Amino acid sequence: MSIAITGGYVVPVDGEPIEGGTVLVDDGVIVAVGAEADVDVPDDAELVDASGTWVLPGFVEAHGHLGVYEEGDGWAGLDVNEMTDPNGARLRALDGINPDDEGFRDALAGGVTTVVVKPGSGNPIGGQTVAVKSWGRTVDDMLVRQPVSVKSALGENPKRVYGEKDKLPSTRLGVAAVIRDAFTKAQDYRAAREWAARENTPFERDNTSEILVQVLDGDLPWCQHSHRADDIATAIRLSEEFGYRLIVNHGTEGHLIADLLADKGIPVIIGPLIVGRSKVEVRRRSLRNPGILARAGVEIALTTDHPVVPIDFLVHQATFAVKEGLDTETALRSITVNPARIMGLDDRVGALRPGLDADIVLWSGDPLDVMSRAVRVFVNGRDVYHFDETTNQGTTTTPFYEDPH
């Protein structure tokens, strides 16, 4: 079925805004974006009047814990960290996501339609990340891509977790050693697997090494939790030693080595930004840092690290970063096309462009204005969220079965 969203101020993000533009959707995919006169709308298309609104792609959260770190459920909903094995490469965030987590409804209210869900940072190697849509009945319905990357952590968290258990790693030296040992083993595993294939002999597979080989082969990037500049330098050192693609996550002190990150072409998913300086590693947390990184030439994406910051505040972090020096174009790109490209999802989401998923959000005004709100949200062309101005409440279409009787 075709849907034509007409009459709004269309902001494709990777193209020039269109006053009174039209976005045409067919079978959940964007098929045309342009001025009203340039888009041929089928006679049987459902018309959505977007007059008076800004029409944007759904936002992309590049680093969240929706569904694996459920709010208000305590121990029962806490599946973000399997802190019994320092090397959790075989673990999949996909297997722990609860689609009924309240955070997914908050995401829609904040215009966030795609989330890269990641394991936590308690382990040197936390596990596989997954990209999902913010609406669906099962995680399989919501799936965009699995796996997207492998999550790893340096610094304070893993050394504290395992130090309290009086086992390796209890220092930064130990954390780096666990990662290095895992990749060395994966190199040997790959060589043995290749030999077995050539000789046509049986080979015992290992799920942990299989995933790390994908990182070594360049099929999966390495998402490195790292706050301090020295930890970021360690992340770079390890990535160059083993030749994998590095994505810095958090990067609180990345601005101190911004030129180095830019020269090496290493992107930074920075944040959360509107939090207190709760530990030593984030003592240099500042809303100025995204602008410093961007002006140095670093590709950035913003993250709430939900639930550290509520996911519906993703756009507010962009607004506050603009207030502290980030240019508005980069701010908008940092929650749309940039996270999509950094995480390898730009063939599906992040912009209003023919061929991409029809994840479309109608805003009451400029989304970087804190008084603006998402008034209607489409995921894969399906109308899933509506804000009612008369009741001042938002309503999410339930994806779950309802007895018609």
Image: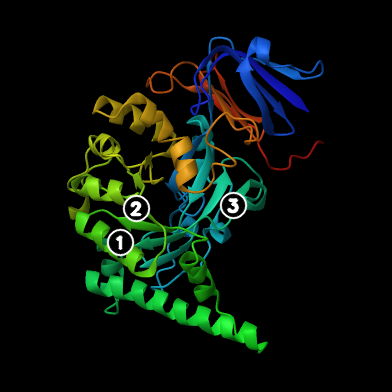
* For residue 375, above or below residue 269: above
> Of the residues tagged 3 and 1, which is closer to the observer?
1
Residue in front for this viewpoint, 312 or 381: 381
Residue 87, percent across and down? 42, 73
Give the residue drawn at x 40%, y 36%: 334
Q: Can see residue 393?
A: yes
* Residue at the disc numbered 1: 235
Disc 1 vs disc 2: Cβ atoms closer than 8 Å? yes
In whole angstroms, how far apart are the C-alphas of marks 3 and 1? 25 Å
Q: Residues within 10 Å of mark 3 (few under 14, many from 20)?
A: some
Answer with mark 1 or mark 2, whichever residue precedes in sequence: 1
As shown in the figure, which amino acid type bears the numbered disc 1? Answer: Ala
* For residue 223, above or below residue 277: below
| On-image quarter of the N terminus | top right
Count of number-bearing discs: 3
Answer with mark 3 or mark 1, whichever residue precedes in sequence: 3
In whole angstroms, how far apart are the C-alphas of marks 2 and 3? 20 Å
* For residue 332, above or below residue 341: above
Residue 44, percent across and down? 82, 18
Give the residue drawn at x 80%, y 36%: 404
In whole angstroms, how far apart are the C-alphas of marks 1 and 2? 8 Å
Give SS at disc 3. Answer: strand
As shown in the figure, which amino acid type bears the numbered disc 2? Answer: Val
Q: Residues within 10 Å of mark 2 (few under 14, many from 20)?
A: many
